[in-house]
Every structure is written in structure tokens, then in C-alpha cells.
Image: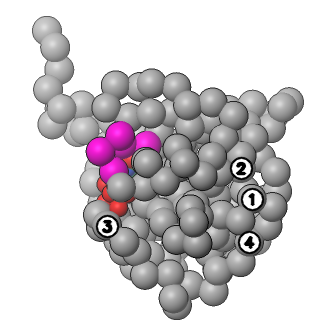
Amino acid sequence: MAIDSATQRRIMGRFATGVTVVTTRWQDELVGLTANAVASLSLDPPLVLVAIDRASQTHAKLVASRCYAVNILSAEQQEISQRFAQRGPKDFTDLNVTTAVTGAPILGGVLGWVDCRVTEILPGGDHDIFIGHIEAGGWREGSPLLFFAGKYARLDVRI
Ligand SMILES: Cc1cc2nc3c(=O)[nH]c(=O)nc-3n(C[C@H](O)[C@H](O)[C@H](O)COP(=O)(O)O)c2cc1C
């Protein structure tokens, strides 16, 4: 029996994740969206993947720019997650943006980040999978923002 999307969401929502904002820069425009379909794919070469909804506005910009940053949010950054989960242009003005190699925006205060060049775009149903080669990265100590069963959550540890 085929599973309906509400049931799939309910089941896969039991898989607790961190929360990231995937960003890029295209023709001086900064764009991005909240994403948790993110994985560390390979160590040698260093690759990560992100699955991006083909219907999102960010998708076309990622295809055009061929680069992205994955910004891993801290427990204090739930508002940023909510902001980047809204469809359409995002306000970066208060976010203390820096860049590393590709020019994709790295958000201030994140727990970790990787700056990637897109090496492959693979079809995945209503999403596309963007494989990125890590060109630069960084991290700091702190506590992550989590997403579980459709709600934000926190961890009681700080590492
Ligand atoms: C916790 C959370 C995780 C999400 N993960 C993804 C994801 O992995 N991929 C994706 O395409 N959208 C994901 N979304 C939805 C996008 O953030 C949302 O559709 C956003 O409005 C897209 O913005 P845009 O159309 O301006 O690009 C997630 C939303 C939330 C709240």
C-alpha cells in the first residue's frame, strides 16, 4: 500500500535532526531556506548533500550559482529558522554575514558552517539533491537547535 504524505511526515518526523539554513548568492542577491534534509556524504573527497524542494524559490538560485553554505543553527537561533522557512526573499540585514571561498553567505552566531561548490545535482522526486564539495568550514562550541515531530527542541548539553 502506498503511504500518504501526512503519514510519511509523521514517521520521518520521529527522526530528530539539527536545523540548518542553506544559503547562496546569485548576482548580488542573498537567498536561503531552512533545511534539515542535510547529510555529510563523503570524507574523501569532502562532500555534503542537501535535498531542496524543486518548487522553492531558492532552488533556481542554487542551480544558477552552483555554490551554497550550510549554516548549522544554535539553540538561540530558532527565530532565524522560522524566518528562513517563509517562502520568498529573506532579510539578511541583521545577520552579520561573512563569506569564505564561494561567496555564499555564512550567518553570524551559527554552531558550524561549510562553504561548498556544487559538483552534482541529482533528481529526487519533488526535490533535487545538491552534492557539494566542501571548500571551507568552521565551528564553535554551543548547543544545537533541534527539530523533532514537527516542533523545535533543545538538547541539554553544550559541547
Ligand atoms: C525544520 C524545517 C526543515 C526544512 N527542511 C527543508 C529541506 O531540507 N529542504 C527543503 O527544500 N525545504 C525544507 N524546509 C522548507 C523550506 O524552508 C520552506 O519551504 C521555505 O519557505 C522555502 O523558501 P523559498 O521558497 O523562499 O526558497 C524546511 C522547513 C523547516 C521548518
Magenta span: 52-56
- How far is mark 1 from mark 4, CA to CA? 7 Å
- How far is mark 3 from mark 4, CA to CA? 22 Å
Quadrant of the rendered structure where residue 132 is? top right
Classed neighbour count for the residue bearing mark 4: other residues with Cα under 10 Å, few (<14), some (14–19), many (≥20): few
Query: Disc 1 vs disc 4: Cβ atoms closer than 8 Å?
Result: yes
Q: Which mark is residue 102?
A: 1
Q: Main secondary structure of the magenta part?
A: loop
- Sequence order check, earlier mark of 3 and 1: 3
Residue 67 seen by the camera: yes
How is the model colour-coded? one colour
Q: Left or right of 71: which side holds 98? A: right
Of residues 145 and 80, which is closer to you in this image?
80
Classed neighbour count for the residue bearing mark 2: other residues with Cα under 10 Å, few (<14), some (14–19), many (≥20): many
- Sequence order check, earlier mark of 3 and 4: 3
Amino acid type at mark 3:
Gly
Task: Give SS at disc 2.
Answer: strand
- Sequence order check, earlier mark of 2 and 1: 1
Pinpoint residue 119: horizontal percent, then vertical percent.
69, 34
Pinpoint residue 135: horizontal percent, then vertical percent.
82, 51
**Which quadrant of the picture is home to ligand 1?**
bottom left
Amino acid type at mark 4:
Thr
Of residues 4 and 93, which is closer to you in this image?
93
- Pointer 4 residue Cβ closer than 8 Å to ligand 1: no
